[in-house]
Every structure is written in C-alpha cells, then in structure tokens.
Image (tube, rainbow, N blue to C red):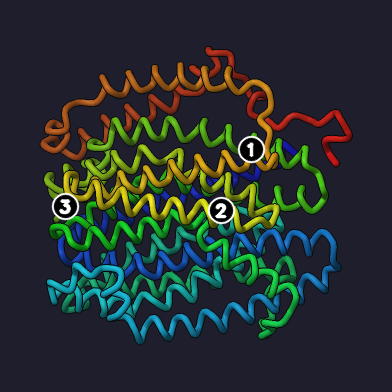
Amino acid sequence: MSKQLVKSTAVVVTMTLISRVFGFMRDMVTAYYFGAGALFDAFAMAFKIPNFMRRLFAEGSFSQAFVPVLAEHQKKNTEEETKQFINAVAGSLSVALLIVTVIGIVFAPLLVSLFAPGFLATDHRYELTVTMLRITFPYLFLISLTALSGAILNTYHRFWVAAFTPVFLNIVMIMAAMFLSPQFKTPIIGLAWGVFIAGIIQLLFQIPFLKQLRLLPKPRIAFHDPGVKRVLTLMVPALFGVSVGQINLMVDTFFVSFLTVGSVSWLYYSDRLMEFPLGVFGVAISTVILPNLSRHHASESPGLFAFTLDWALRAILLMGIPATLALTILSGPILSTLFQHGHFHAHSVRMAQQSLIAFALGITPFMLVKILAAGFYAKQDMKTPVRVGVIAMFANIIFNVGLIWPLKHAGIALATTLAAIVNSGLLFYLLRKSQFYAPRAGWMLFLLRLAITNTVIAIALYYGAADLNTWTTQTIEWRIQHLAVLLIGAVVAYFPLLWLTGMRIEDLLIPKIVDPMLAK
C-alpha cells in the first residue's frame, strides 16, 4: 500500500508539474502582452470570480463530499449501483450548475460590485470586468463537470488524467493571447474567450478515459436519490472547510480593489507563483490520500488511516519548507526572470515581490490545511472544518483591516498567510484531540534533520542571489542562467543533504502494520 501511495503521488506530482510549467509560460506571455495595469486588473477579476466558485464548489465542497461517498459505494455496492449513483450526481449537478451559470451571466454587474467594489470608481475597469465576466462565467459550468469526471477517475486510481487536464487551459490561453486577442478592439477580451474555449476542451479530454472505465455518466436528474442527498448534505458544511482559503483570497480581492491600479495584478502574479508548490505538492498529496483515507474509514482500519495521514504530513513538510525558503529568498529574481518583459516593468517586479514574500510564508500552512481537512472529510465529518474555517475567515478579515493600510497589497497577502496558520493549527489540534490521528515515532528526529538541511540551503541561496537591482537591469539570458543555477543547485543538493543528516527513504514510507489489531 505504501509503494502504491508513493507511486500515485509521484504520478500526480509529475502531471501537475507539467501543468504548472505551462502555467508559467502562460503567465509570461500574458505579462509580456498586457503587463500589470488596469486592463489586466479587469481580466484577473473576471477570471477570479468563476475560478473562485470552481474551487469553492467543484474542487472544494463537491469533491470533498463526493469522493468519500463514491469510495463507499465502490466498496459496498455493485458496479451497476455505483453507475446509477454517478448518473444521478451528474444529472443533478448539471442542472444546478446551469442555473448558477445563467444567474451569474445575468447578474454579472452585481457580482463585480460585490467582489470588487473599488472598481466602481473607475468606469472603464468596472465595465470591462462585467463584459469579460459574462464571457468567462460559463467556465464554471464546464470546469465543474470536469472536476466531477476527475473525481471519478481519481477514485479509480486514474490520477494522471485530472492532474494533466489543466495543461489545456494554459495552452489555449497562450494561443488566445498571441493570436485571438489582436482580433479585438480591446485585446484583453480575447483572453476571456480563451478561458471559455479551454473549459470545453478540458471537459472533452476526460470523456475517453471515463468510457474506458465504462463510467461515462448518463445524466439523470435525481435530487431525491439517497446518494445525491448524502453528497448534498456533506457539501453544505464542506463549503468552509478546505475551501476557506479561496474565501480568504476573495476577501483579499475585495480589499485590494480599493488600492492603486496594478495592485490586483501584483497579487495575481505573486499568487500564481505561490500556487506552484501548493498545486504540485499540496493538492497532489491531498488528491491521492482522500480516496485512500475514505477506503480505510469504510474498511474500519484506523491504523492505516493514521499512518496515511502521518505520511502525508511528513511529505508536506519535506516539500513545503524548502519551497517557502526558495520563494522567499529568490522572490525578486524569480519574478524578474519570468515576467519582466514587454509591458511588465521593474517597478511591477518590486511590487509583486512584496506580496510574494508574504504569500510564501504561508505555503506550508496552506498545504497542511488540505491534508488535515481531508482527515475529517474522509470520516465524513464536515462540521469540524466548518467551525475552523469560519474562525479563520474572520481572522483573515481582522488581519486585512489591520495590515492593508501600512503594507498595502503586501498586507493583504500577509493576512491570508496568517489566516492559513490559524486554520491549520486549529485543524491539527482538533484532529489530535478527536484521536483520528496519532503521530508515529521519530518526529523530533525528522524535524531536526529538516531544520539542518533547510538552514544550509537557505544560507546558500541567500549568499548566491545578487541584489534585486542587478536582476532587473541584467539581460534575460543572464537572469535565466543564474536562476537556473540557484534553483537546480538547491534541488540537487537537498536530498543528499537530507541523507547526510541520516534520513533514509524508508523514513518516508508508510511502515507495514504487523499488529493485526491496528489494521482493523
């Protein structure tokens, strides 16, 4: 089981890494053509609103509620009964999504007013955001059905398909920026159409793989189906669980809309960089462990359940801590190398650096929230993450109010990080208190080895990186070469350094359970 878990995680990490590389290429292209000003502020907001709802409902509450119920169906029911459950969920979800999409298009002006009230003071940004939101909002319908397909495939261990699917969004948006945008009087609108087209392609891509499993849904509207009712019941409280981070980001957007032009763009680009390690490692690990945790719960195997959680927490720290250090110390060089081209100038690099450092400090807490909340969701306990999520959300608002004035957009990013620390800390405390999780032996030695290794890496990166002014004035070739040396050197040195501290591969695996009582 341990080897299968590691293998599945490696597959998701690899596919997600490919997607994120294309995501960087997409951001580099959009930064080159549109920079960080009023036009991109408007697009970022028009894309953020349906994306927020996607992460909140499709990848947040729906996936966390659907996967455990589907895993239980797969374990206890016949194949035909499982298919009927999937058909009922697909039909009911499609109807609900269609209604929400129509409402979103009709009331786009109200949504922009709610999410970005600061745009009302500038008619151009407001009207442009409304226009593009009406184009991008159907993406919610398409990508939510894609998330349903991905959840089915993940439950049946076809993890790579869903992890690879976002590549198409990035490719289509690159093509839209380069070839479709010039066809419009206001070129940024072409980028909005790229989002819509990408949603269609992403959904179509997953259909053949569902057919292979003979699980392609034949949608039927069945809100009274017991399985659908179960999912809906679990969805309601789950809205505030893992997805509380997305709510916090939208709270951030509300505040940042009142700041100077460009602030939305600076937060967008710094958030995109923070999302790289979060998506590659945090989302990948949580995606893999949720079906496994759900099966262990359904099989009444608390020993395997606790061991799986323990492995996930160690894996998160193993990857999250060095990612935090790299993005904090090399924030300026990374932003300059990736985005300082065309309309994205050195001033934008410095502004985005401030928020990137603040976001980077929250990488590990953000990852931990996904893992710790999965521990509750697998046991179909949705209420606990709700309570914690509400506390974290109000903490974020308080932090925003206190930090936005002295630190501007960087204060908003820091408030999000502090809220993630509150969220992860409370989830861990309650998970331990409920006895869902008991750490296995060796944690102190594991943390000591991590501390020694990451201290060495941090010192090397700090002294290896030049002053930011050097990066912003050098050629792109110089920036690429020096950043590659720093990052590749850190990655190559990391695991040998861990080995020198005494860490071995078996320390990262889930041990075989020799006590049969633990597996019950």
Q: Residue at x 39, y 54 (%)?
A: 394
For the residues marked 1 and 3, what is the alpha-carbon distance in whole angstroms?
Answer: 47 Å
* Label 1 or label 2, whichever comes before in sequence order: 2
**Would residue 140 appear left or right of 180 to someone viewing this image?**
right
**Based on the displayed image, in which of its 4 quarters is residue 420 positioned?**
top left
Where residue 113 appears, x then y in whole percent? 26, 75
How many residues crowd around disc 2 within 10 Å: few (fewer than 14), some, or many (20 or more)?
many
Can residue 385 be seen by looking at this rendering?
Answer: yes
In which quadrant of the rendered view does residue 148 lie? bottom right
Q: Left or right of 94: which side holds 219?
A: right
Within 10 Å of the Cα at label 1, are there few (<14), some (14-19), or many (20+) other Cα atoms?
A: few
Compute the Cα span from label 2 to label 3: 40 Å
Report the mark closest to the observer, 1 or 3: 1
Q: Position of residue 334 (x, y in %)?
A: 27, 39
- Outermost residue to the right: 516
Q: Which residue was labeled with disc 2?
A: 385
Residue at 19% in and 60% down? 33
Looking at the image, is 190 positioned above or below residue 48?
Answer: below
Callout 3 amino acid? Phe
Image vertical order of residue 328 relative to residue 9, above or below: above
Determine which of the numbered discs, if any, sits on residue 344 in the image.
3
Q: State the quadrant of the N terminus.
A: top right
Residue at numbered disc 1: 432
Q: Amino acid at mark 2?
A: Pro
Classify mark 3: residues with Cα within 10 Å, few (<14), some (14-19) or many (20+): many
